[in-house]
Image: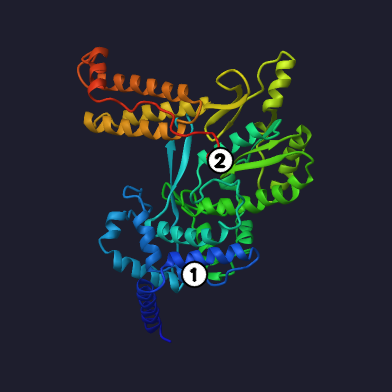
Amino acid sequence: MPLERRRLHVVARCEETSAAHRGGEPVATKLQRIAEKARQEPSLKFTNLFYLMNDELLRGCFQRLRKNAAAGIDDVTKEEYAENLDTNLANLLERLHRMAYIPQPVRRVYIPKPGSAKLRPLGVTCLEDKLVQSGLVRILEAVYEQDFIADSYGFRPNRSCHQALRTLNVTIEKGTVNVIAEADIKGFYDNMDQNWIMEFLGHRIGDKLVLRMVKRFLKAGIMEDGELLASDEGAPQGGSISPILSNIYLHYALDIWFEKVFRKSCTGFARLIRYADDFIVCFQRGEEAERFCVELGERLGKFNLEVEPTKTKVIKFGRFATKEAAAKGEKRPETFDFLGFTHYCSTKRDGTGFRVKRKTASKRFTAKVAAFKEWLKKSRTLKTKDLWGTAKAKLRGHYAYYGVTDNSRGIARFAYEVKNLLFKWLNRRGRRGCLNWEKFNRMLELFPLPVPRIKVSMFETR
């Protein structure tokens, strides 16, 4: 068939498919059936998935894109793409289904890392790449959400950091936990082996079109200062597909090994709680925690990953560790950090009974204050009304995450620092000394800032 006729045939087929989906079974229903099939048959390999990349799926992905999302190397914004959305999506689908779609390189930029002199690399993908990646994520989620362990919380539907923290809290307070193993994977996202990514995907995905498209994103390259760099390692930075690929990677490299091999070799209690590449392991027996740290390095080494030795340790923690320290006249057990909080051993409010408590980690607190200060510097030309409104939104966001049980002092400290910074920067806007604390406090009475309150309970909810 001539090329032009073949293109027309593909376009017609895409239009028929789109029309069928508008009047027929929704994509969400098909994804739900795939999820049910994956749950019922854990060893099933899905060979027909790419057909789900249709107008309905991509249109839904487009609607979920942030309006102010940064543009990639093609400089196309959501607003510009929306001007001819129907035509653009039809063209995208035509290229996808004849496998003529080639992802563009990720635009790499560096942004200041709050609280540090270092710069953090940030990858910005093109709009169409965002759409296709988002579509692939929905398809992969339908399959792999049925496989992931219950104690994996990062970047998964209907799961959150607070759920991971609550699980950790309940495990330590109600279980027989005596020690905590902390471990850190060195440069995880940059060092994921792409061959292993494709190997892991092959366990459940037999659709060659899905696999080819994922591989194209892995090999798309990085554009930095006008120079195209190869991307032979890791997953596309900043891409929406990276989180699920990382979860799949650690599911096979870490989670399954811990659940089916290591934990079964333990004589005492053991539980791994993971959020993305950040994880904590609770143990009853110290020797098994020590053995875990050794065998973890060996296990991850098979998949081109390394443990960061300076951030890997075993500490005594829990009610028994607290009693032991008290009996010896020692201080409370060591603390550990997880998901932005420092966890420490304490007692109930009446002074009796063991409790795990948490406060904002000092490094995270310093970084958050520095980030707010940096935002004020960049926003000095905003109208006071707009600046005040954004400051309130930032405070509400901070309280929503850090306002957890026992962290009243931490969020109150942040509110205090923010109030002082606002006073300082508003005072710089006019003549020196034009704003004193009396005037500023009157302003706070008229336009109050959000009050720091505990928003999230760390106690088990039913």
Amino acid type indicated by mark 1: Phe
Look at discs 1 and 2 and give the one toward the viewer.
2
Q: List the residue tagged with mark 2.
A: 164
Q: Reply above or below: 409 against 305.
A: above
Mark before the other along the chain sequence, 1 or 2: 1
Q: Which numbered marker is on residue 432? A: none
For the residue pair 38 and 11, the one nearer the viewer reads as 38
Q: Are marks 1 and 2 in contact (CB under 8 Å)?
A: no
**311 and 251: which one is in front?**
251
- In the displayed structure, does residue 336 sit left or right of residue 364? right
| Residue name at image x 39 percent, y 55 percent | 126
- Give the crowd class for mark 1: few <14, some 14-19, many >=20 residues within 10 Å: some
Task: Note whether 311 is above or below 105 in the view shown.
Answer: above
Looking at the picture, how far across and down is residue 408, in whole percent?
46, 24
Dot 1 falls on a residue whose secondary structure is helix
Q: Where does the image place residue 257, in percent across and percent down from the top left?
A: 71, 50
Q: CA distance from mark 1 to mark 2?
A: 33 Å
Residue with the mark numbered 1: 50
453 over 4 or under it: above or below? above
Crowd band around label 2 with a 10 angstrom C-alpha radius: few (<14), some (14–19), many (20+): many
Describe residue 220's horizontal placement relative to residue 299 as left or right. left
Residue name at image x 27 percent, y 55 percent: 79
Instruction: Note whether residue 233 is visible.
Output: no
Q: What residue is rendered at 33% in x and 34% in y?
A: 393
Is residue 290 rendered to the left or right of residue 65? Answer: right
Task: State the SS at label 2.
Answer: helix
Left or right placement of residue 373 versus residue 286 in this view: left
